[in-house]
Image: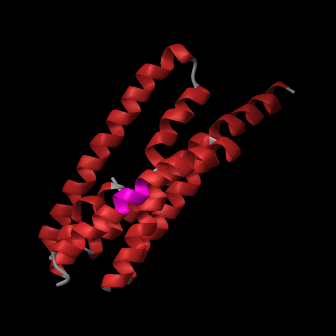
Amino acid sequence: MAISMPQVHIVAYCGDLGYGVAVGTQIIALMLGLGVISRLASGAFADRIGAAPMLIVGSSMQALALLLYLFFNSQSSLYVISGLFGLFQGGIVPMYAVIIRQYLPPREAGVRISLVLMATVLGMACGGLAAGYIFDATGSYRLAFLHGFLWNCVNLVLVAWLMLWPKLGRRKWEAMTA
């Protein structure tokens, strides 16, 4: 849900701030263009540090960018923050597929990757929709950005738990059988 909030609403946000929708379209173009670079760079870094740690890094940095939207809204800061957001968010979704392939047998990977990618698309749809409802209810994007940040934190906790669970479970098992 966190990824879609700025992508769906940055043009309207720029319009509401008085910068105009043309500036918003430039900002979204910057964000999405840097997202492509992020996908490629994330893959290269994942080859070195692993997909799960790369997912944690990307998601943490995305959370930071979402947090920055809460404190800065000048035109120049929106370019910088949105550029950073693009650099951080682009590699997150592809890491899910790589992680599934690393942890599951090949015969299960296709179905699991499809389910996870479907869940990410549904989450992105709900994130944009929820941000719109929040804006409609409050007249401000501040709570919508906070909403995205909080969902990003939920994602971080779940991913960290999934990364640690096999290690913790194995230690418990070894302790019980020792």
Dominant secondary structure of the magenta stretch? Answer: helix
What colour scheme has been applied to the protein in the rendered image? secondary structure
Picture quadrant of residue 103: top right
Residue drawn at the location 58% of the way across and 18% of the way down: 105
Using the image as rendered, state which of residue 77 and residue 3 is in the foreground.
Answer: 77
Picture quadrant of residue 137: bottom left
Say above or below: 70 vs 82.
Answer: below
Q: Is residue 33 magenta?
A: yes
Residue drawn at the location 50% of the way across and 56% of the way down: 59
Residue drawn at the location 30% of the way across and 41% of the way down: 121
Say above or below: 71 vs 9.
Answer: below
- In the picture provided, is 141 more to the left or to the right than 16? right
Using the image as rendered, state which of residue 42 and residue 56 is in the foreground.
Answer: 42
Say above or below: 172 vs 57.
Answer: above
Q: Is residue 54 magenta?
A: no
Residue farthest to the right, as pictured: 178
Q: Which residues are magenta?
A: 31-35
| Image x and y of residue 173, in percent | 75, 29
Q: Is residue 73 visible?
A: no
Q: Is residue 43 visible?
A: yes
- In the picture provided, is 97 more to the left or to the right than 31? right
Residue drawn at the location 38% of the way across and 69% of the way down: 82
